[in-house]
Image (cartoon, rainbow, N blue to C red):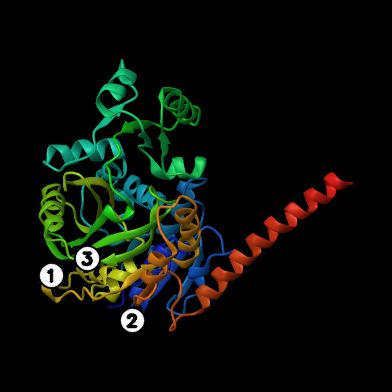
Amino acid sequence: MENKAVVLGANYYIGLSVIRCLGMRGVKVAAVDYSRKGTYGFRSRYCGETLVAPHYRENPRGLLDFLIDYARKQSWTPVLFPCADPYVEFVDEHMHALKEYYLLPPMEQGLYTTLLDKGSLHRLADSHGVAVPETISVQEEGYLQRVEAELGYPCLVKPTDSFAFMARFRQKLLKVYNRDELVSSIEKANSANIEVVVQRIIPGFDDHMYTFDAYLDQNSRVTHWLTCQKQRQFPINYGASVYAVLKYVPELYETGSRFLEGIKFKGFAEIEFKKDERTGIFYLIEVNVRTTNLNSLIDKAGINMPYLAYLDLNGAPVEPREPQTVNYRNTAFWYAYEDLLAVRDYLRSRQLTLRRIFSSYLRPKAYAVWSFRDPAPALVFMSNIASRVWRRVSGRFKRSRAKAG
């Protein structure tokens, strides 16, 4: 097929994994980002074009015009792949305009945003009979009394917009242990104009987190799926996967497929669940509506999700795959840089032992950044890390000298 794939977001390993999954299948890939500096996805051998576009938040109209202008110059309609939540929100907001020039899943406008927003997601899941953690809005009268009577402490203060919260506070959520901390955390979020809710903590260590990863064709039918189990996250306990393994959990298919097909979803989605260690109930935590951290692991298991989407949007038949054919071998996804940071914190908090950590590394790996076939992005990534460390160390040295003087 002659249609190019336009990948939005190349300065993170998710976009890089999409570039590789498509490029290895012979698809012509154009990667888009708002800067060349440190954008290691641009260095992939599978990236045919590198395009610097306006920033999705600083100049969304400029980005829209840029993408439309690029598509107009192509002989074949490109396929668009947003690889980060802000790009998903951008595509959802401008879906009608983009659909005139790009191939996109034929979904109603607003569904992406509904699933990204934690408040509307939980209401939607609850209406489809999917268990979600007990949640209380801070907007309702008497919420403090409800929190203490129904949830108890500790509990979680979670943003409805995770990306905005993470960008402001460098945390996905806040764990509070008493009323003063709860009120202070809510005030902090309010000062940043970020809406938050209060949620019960589902008991269980990080290995009680699971994912249901699925592709749904244009008839909203699950054709391919597998399940994974997290082992470690960063930040620990409430972060993104940095070490995860394939784990066959058919119960998650029953719940996940029923929900995604029920809301008429199309394309790739990943539902994160947490299993209550006391009751065994799986609770829906969030839904990712773009390619996720675990894409390289899913590909290694034999399911190339980006290429499935590319074929489906080009009208090629997507034949369902039986779950028994998925290669649930002893393979782990590994994002080494953040996993080492996570290991440090797990050891400090005595949540894991060195023996358990070392034994986990004996598994075959699906790397987040490294690839023997495509090493250049990893080299640029390591250079970025080295530069960041040097700036930090030299900055401390200069400050200490200034104080001494």
Mark 3 touching mark 2, by CB under 8 A? no
What quarter of the picture does the N terminus occupy? Answer: bottom left
- Of badges 3 and 2, the one in the foreground is 3
Q: Mark 2 or mark 1: which is in front?
A: 1
Q: Amino acid at mark 2?
A: Gly
Going by the numbered disc 3, the residue's amino acid type is Lys
Is residue 123 depicted above or below 333 in this figure?
Answer: above
Dot placed on the residue nearer the N-terminal end, 2 or 1: 2
Tell me which label, 3 or 2, sits earlier in the chain. 2
Q: Specify few, some or many for label 1: CA neighbours under 10 Å numbering under 14, 14-19, or 20 or more.
A: some
Report the residue at 42% width, 44% height from top: 172
Q: Is residue 156 left or right of residue 208?
A: right
Please provide percent x and percent y for residue 281.
16, 46
Give the label on residue 26, or none.
Answer: 2
For the residues bearing labels 1 and 3, Cβ distance under 8 angstroms: no
The numbered disc on residue 181 is none
SS at mark 3? loop
Q: Please, what secondary structure does the residue beneath circle 1 have? A: helix
- Looking at the picture, which amino acid does disc 1 mark? Pro
Residue 269 x %, y %? 24, 56
Query: Where's residue 227, x and y in %?
Result: 21, 62
Question: Can I make out residue 54 in this image?
Answer: yes
Callouts 2 and 1 close, C-beta under 8 Å: no
Disc 1 or disc 3, which is closer to the eye? 3
Which residue, given by chain and number where applicable, does mark 1 sit on?
A: 323
Residue 247: mark in rendering = 3
Q: Is residue 283 left or right of residue 6?
A: left
